[in-house]
Image (cartoon, rainbow, N blue to C red):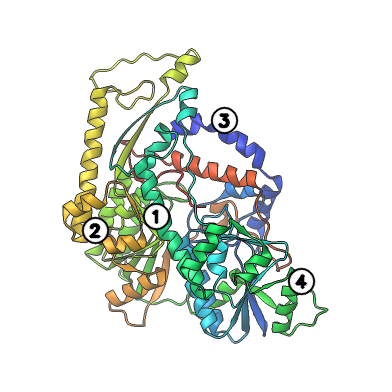
């Protein structure tokens, strides 16, 4: 299955790479790998600089996947920081007398993976705590989009460039459908599935969303949008209804209108904002810039201040399950079932590890690999507490591996659920015949070549595969009912492959508590009766530069607004992401518990 999609789309992917690949990007990656970290210093009367272009990921940089191709396409090495490091840095800066204010600038990078609303909600909470400490937050992107404004609306002062704009036109989800293209290529696709909302197979069969899929997408987007309206309007002293009216009236607000509607506090050019920051830090007007330290650099300072490098015999292990769930060991950026299960076994037998926080940020994938991981969660929970913290998405296989934990935490705008199963069965018979290729099979039994891609499946073969899909779906339902202590009929009703927001999942009993990663960590400490004497360890451990091949370049001082990607490169990266998901389909039986491959929110 994996090789089928790899070769079928290789030509098209190569075209996108040819159009978007930047030699400068490749050079930047090698320069980043060669760069050496130096110990950052915090000057008195400094401003903490938070570039929204910094990609906030779950696991520490280097612990998970590489983004080599994405970085080459974008023309620059993507700067990353772990969610926990970002939150700890902002919280520590609120207490640090050397830090006077926080400067929020730039735009969330469309090429990054850390722009999900659930991740941003946790960061937003840290910004609110910083503001509550009495320190000022100044926000100034050139152009505001919803994700930027979701964070920036916390600021004491929101400035907008007189030539800029503010986008509050709502959320959308655009899906790509391959059915006509596959038909033209001569590629046939048959599917087996359970759950009327299990829409992951639709791109191969349809040219638009099914009514059920459209219904669940509208409901999910509505939940996420309400969270945005509530959060942003509260900080701007508006009502959600007022902000909704503004959104319905204009797709993009001109600067003067945004000021009039109180969505921003003033119109200013960048030099004027920098002058204000100089005044805060006591720099003279002749100075080129103000005293500052980037969030990424300050995170290293905060790590030492918080004593994160200290060792305790009472440890809470954070295990990051981030990416597609695949059979076997998996590649960087994937959750390999066998590799992840081994990690849990090792932590289960480690006497210093008293509790495990499983941080899940995954749309799912291989059903077999999900079961392998879930079994280790069940066994581990018998020895020590296992607490799940759901990130931006923890659905389908991501929910499968979560459900037997002691407690599940999710944000209101987490995407979860999607309890359903499907199988994708491609064949290239017509494609081969069109170019003169034929096949001849010799077999000893009727179904010996059932997984061949050289011909369509017979009705009898489809019935056999559907039987397996039905069995796995029933197991999924039973497991959820048993682990969540829910009536099986109720689970069957709320399953059907339907995705839910974290807030609705909480109401349905699919998650236990709304909260973020730190909430899950504190609960784990309480569950393990650790008091205040414990330390955190993170898994998987960061890989070396040699293993990673590419590293990140050092943060630069604030000079200009963060560079945005051009539309062509942005679309190329989206397409590559979709193809990467297809290449991750390696379940030995071709059966998956996964969200739609190209589900994204804009």
Judging by the rendered image, the residue that carries numbered circle 1 is 220
In this picture, is 451 found above or below 512? above
In this picture, is 12 found above or below 233? above
Q: Earlier in the sequence, mark 4 or mark 3?
A: 3
Q: Position of residue 87 (x, y in %)?
A: 50, 72
CB contact under 8 Å: marks 3 and 1: no
Within-10-Å neighbours for mark 3: few <14, some 14–19, many 20+: few
Within-10-Å neighbours for mark 2: few <14, some 14–19, many 20+: some
Q: In this view, which residue lies farthest toward the right?
A: 286
Q: Look at the numbered disc 1 and give the secondary structure of its residue.
A: helix
CB contact under 8 Å: marks 2 and 4: no
Q: Is residue 364 visible?
A: no
Frontmost residue, 525 versus 243: 243
Judging by the rendered image, the residue that carries numbered circle 2 is 378
Judging by the rendered image, the residue that carries numbered circle 4 is 271
Judging by the rendered image, the residue that carries numbered circle 3 is 11
Is 125 on the left or on the right of 571, as rendered? left
Quadrant placement of the N terminus: top left
In this picture, is 310 found above or below 72? below
Q: CA separation, marks 2 and 1?
A: 30 Å
Q: Look at the numbered disc 4 and give the secondary structure of its residue.
A: helix
Please name the residue shown 29% across and 52% down the image: 400
Q: Earlier in the sequence, mark 2 or mark 4?
A: 4
Residue 572 disc label: none
Q: Is residue 571 visible?
A: yes
Q: Look at the numbered disc 3 and give the secondary structure of its residue.
A: helix
Frontmost residue, 269 versus 446: 269
Specify the quadrant of the image occupied by residue 487. bottom left
Q: Look at the numbered disc 2 and give the secondary structure of its residue.
A: helix
């Amino acid at each position: 299955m994996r090789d089928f999609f790899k070769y079928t789309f290789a030509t098209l992917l190569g075209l996108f790479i040819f159009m978007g690949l930047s030699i400068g990007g490749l050079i930047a990656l090698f320069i980043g790998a060669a760069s050496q970290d130096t110990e950052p210093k915090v000057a008195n009367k400094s401003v903490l600089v938070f570039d929204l272009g910094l990609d906030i990921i779950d696991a520490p940089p280097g612990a998970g996947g590489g983004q080599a191709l994405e970085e080459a396409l974008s023309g620059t090495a993507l700067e990353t920081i772990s969610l926990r490091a970002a939150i700890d840095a902002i919280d520590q800066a609120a207490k640090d007398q050397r830090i006077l204010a926080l400067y929020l600038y730039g735009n969330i990078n469309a090429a990054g993976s850390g722009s999900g609303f659930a991740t941003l909600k946790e960061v937003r909470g840290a910004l609110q705590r910083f503001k509550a400490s009495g320190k000022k937050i100044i926000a100034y992107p050139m152009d505001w989009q919803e994700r930027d404004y979701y964070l920036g609306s916390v600021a004491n002062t929101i400035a907008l460039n007189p030539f800029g704009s503010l986008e509050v036109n709502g959320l959308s989800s655009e899906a790509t459908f391959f059915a006509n293209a596959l038909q033209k290529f001569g590629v046939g696709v048959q599917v087996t599935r359970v759950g009327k909302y299990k829409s992951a197979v639709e791109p191969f069969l349809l040219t638009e969303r099914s009514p059920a899929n459209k219904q669940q997408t509208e409901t999910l987007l509505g939940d996420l949008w309400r969270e945005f309206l509530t959060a942003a309007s509260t900080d701007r002293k508006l009502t959600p209804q007022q902000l909704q009216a503004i959104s319905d009236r204009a797709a993009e607000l001109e600067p003067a209108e945004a000021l009039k509607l109180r969505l921003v506090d003033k119109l200013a050019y960048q030099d004027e904002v920098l002058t204000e920051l100089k005044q805060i830090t006591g720099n003279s007007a002749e100075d080129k810039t103000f005293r500052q330290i980037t969030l990424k650099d300050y995170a290293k300072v905060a790590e030492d201040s918080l004593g994160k490098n200290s060792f305790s015999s009472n440890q809470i292990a954070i295990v990051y399950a981030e990416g597609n769930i695949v059979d076997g060991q998996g590649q960087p950026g994937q959750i390999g079932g066998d590799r992840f299960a081994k990690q849990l076994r090792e932590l289960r037998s480690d006497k210093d590890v008293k509790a495990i926080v499983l941080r899940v940020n995954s749309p799912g994938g291989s059903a077999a690999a999900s079961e392998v991981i879930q079994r280790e969660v069940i066994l581990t929970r018998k020895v020590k507490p296992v607490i799940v913290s759901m990130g931006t998405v923890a659905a389908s296989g991501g929910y499968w591996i979560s459900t037997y934990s002691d407690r599940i935490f999710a944000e209101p705008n987490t995407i979860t659920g999607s309890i359903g199963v499907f199988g994708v069965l491609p064949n290239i018979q017509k494609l081969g015949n069109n170019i003169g290729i034929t096949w001849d099979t010799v077999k000893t039994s009727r179904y010996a070549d059932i997984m061949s891609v050289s011909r369509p499946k017979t009705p009898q073969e489809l019935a056999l595969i559907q039987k397996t899909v039905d069995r796995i779906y029933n197991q999924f339902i039973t497991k959820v009912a048993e682990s969540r202590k829910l009536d099986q009929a109720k689970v069957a009703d709320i399953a059907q492959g339907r995705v839910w927001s974290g807030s609705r999942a909480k109401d349905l009993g699919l998650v236990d508590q709304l909260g973020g990663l730190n909430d899950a960590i504190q609960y784990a400490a309480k569950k393990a009766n650790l008091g205040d004497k414990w330390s955190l360890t993170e898994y998987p451990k960061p890989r070396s530069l040699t293993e990673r091949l590419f590293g990140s370049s050092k943060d630069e001082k604030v000079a200009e607004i963060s560079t945005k990607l051009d539309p062509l490169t942005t679309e190329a990266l989206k397409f590559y992401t979709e193809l990467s998901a297809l290449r991750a389909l390696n379940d030995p039986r071709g059966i998956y518990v996964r969200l739609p491959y190209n589900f994204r929110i804009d």
